[in-house]
Image (cartoon, rainbow, N blue to C red):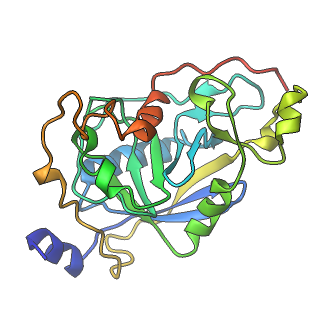
Amino acid sequence: MGVLGLIMASTVQATVVEVRTALGNVQINLFDEETPESVENFLDYVNSGAYANTVIHRLEPGFVAQSGGFVYNGMFPLDSVPTGTPVINEPTLSNVRGTIAMAKLASSPDSATSQWFINLSDNSANLDVQNGGFTVFGQVLGNGMEVLDAIEDLPRFNLGGAADSIPLQDYTNADANNDVEVTGDNLVIITDVVVTDSATVTNPDIVPVENTLIDAATPDVPGSGNNSSGGGSLGFFLLSLALVCRWVKFKRS
């Protein structure tokens, strides 16, 4: 274990937030000390209420569930979350299962704003080195991944734009084929994200996994595994696409 690992093992400064979803609540231990800029950025959105009534707009089973970009205000199309200045990349920790990380634009390491994703599996071999490495800034606590697993099991539908892989509840392929209207009841809505513990040190037993791959990564070049549009990284290319696509117009509820 390196010096960073020893520091992590001795103390972990952490704010705890609760992501409140239609399928259950998920508590997340933020790594204030290891990724201070990213945590501050995330908490700015949390404390402003920007994440209230956001939706999980992209699901890639075995990869990630993404949110933080679009708000449901009782009708379609969804509203975009207003974003501030992009945050500097902090690829210190590893994208293992159960971690939360910042989403960003392809080939732009310092472009993250409001959107985030939770790793549904160990994506370290890909996301720890791609696009400058993806900033992990927290870890799901307790049985929170059971909620994410339930979301992962939902069917996905292509509603266009950033919602080309959106999970829906109580909605079937037959509904889609019969043009049944998608309503708020079908969305996986995050009613709010709130701070539940702002203590300087919380859950000191958690030892985040260090990103040991980033220093050995080669620069992004055409055809390399580190380029976000290169072969072997289609999953993240689709993830990044969610940040630049416009939401298509839906039927009003």
Residue 45 placement (x, y as % from top left): 46, 42
Marks counted in the figure total: 0
Q: Is residue 45 left or right of residue 225?
A: right
Residue 70 placement (x, y as % from top left): 58, 32
**Where 199 sits versus 228, above or below?**
below
Q: Residue at x 8, y 72 (%)?
A: 3
Q: Nearer the viewer, residue 57 or 219?
A: 219
Q: Residue furthest left?
A: 3
Rendered-image quadrant of the C terminus: top right
Q: Residue at x 38, y 70 (%)?
A: 199
Rendered-image quadrant of the N terminus: bottom left
Residue 95 placement (x, y as % from top left): 35, 57
Q: Quadrant of residue 247?
A: top right
Residue 146 placement (x, y as % from top left): 62, 68
Q: Residue at x 17, y 52 (%)?
A: 214
Q: Is residue 23 left or right of residue 178?
A: left
Q: Residue at x 81, y 20 (%)?
A: 251
Q: Is residue 64 left or right of residue 211?
A: right
Q: Quadrant of residue 147?
A: bottom right
Q: Nearer the viewer, residue 30 or 197?
A: 30
Residue 203 makes an appearance in the image: yes
**Where 189 sits versus 15, above or below?**
above
Q: Nearer the viewer, residue 184 or 65?
A: 65
**Where 97 sits versus 164, above or below?**
below
Q: Nearer the viewer, residue 192 or 213?
A: 213
Residue 114 makes an appearance in the image: no
Q: Is residue 131 left or right of residue 162?
A: left
